Amino acid sequence: MADSSKPAPKFRRNRQATEETIVAAFERVLLRDGVQGLGVNAVAQEAGINKVLIYRYFQDLPGLARHWARHSSFWPSELELIGNDPDAFAELAVPDRVRKVLCNYIDAIRARPRTIEVMAGELLNSNDVTRALADGMVVPGKGVADFI
C-alpha cells in the first residue's frame, strides 16, 4: 500500500548526459547550417530538450559555443601545435619552437574547413557566437606559451 503522505519521487535528469546531448546538437546544427543557423531554439529542437536547459547549463548560446570549442577538435590542441612530442619540442631553440608552432597552426587550420568558415565569418559578420568560438583558442594558446 502506497503512503499518500509522501510526494512521488521526481524524475531526476542525468545532467552530464543532457549536457552531452546539447553539445552534440550544437555541433550538428553548426556543421549543417553554419553559424547563421545557430540559435537556442534550433539547438533545443535538435537536442529534443526544452531551451531552458541550455540557459541553465551554459548560461546562453555563446556559453554553449565556448564550451563546445574548448571540448572539441574545432581548434588544434596545444600538443598538436607543438608537434605531439613535448620532448622533441623542448630540444628546439626558442625561435625554432615558435616557427614549428606557427607552421603546425597553419597546417591544423587548413585541415579544419569549418574552423576556416567560422574565422571568415567572424571577420565578415562578428557576433557573440563567433567571438565565443574564437575564445576557444585561448586555452591551447596559453598552453603553447608554457611550452615555448
Image (spheres, rainbow, N blue to C red):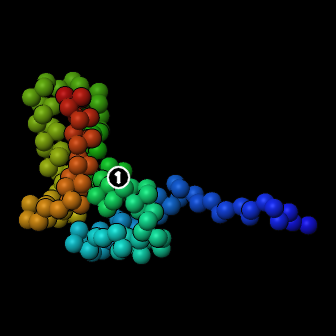
Q: Amino acid at mark 1?
A: His
80 to 44, vertically: above or below: above
Residue at image x 35%, y 74%? 42
Residue placed most toward the observer, 137 or 60: 60
Residue at image x 8%, y 65%? 124
Quadrant, the N terminus: bottom right
Residue placed most toward the observer, 109 or 139: 139
Query: Residue 32, image x and y in percent?
Result: 30, 74
Residue reaching furthest front?
5
Q: Is residue 72 visible?
A: no
Displayed quadrant of residue 85: top left
Query: Residue 123, image x and y in percent?
Result: 9, 60
Residue at image x 17%, y 39%? 101
Quadrant, the C terminus: top left
Displayed quadrant of residue 100: top left
78 to 109, vertically: above or below: above
Q: Is residue 54 visible?
A: yes
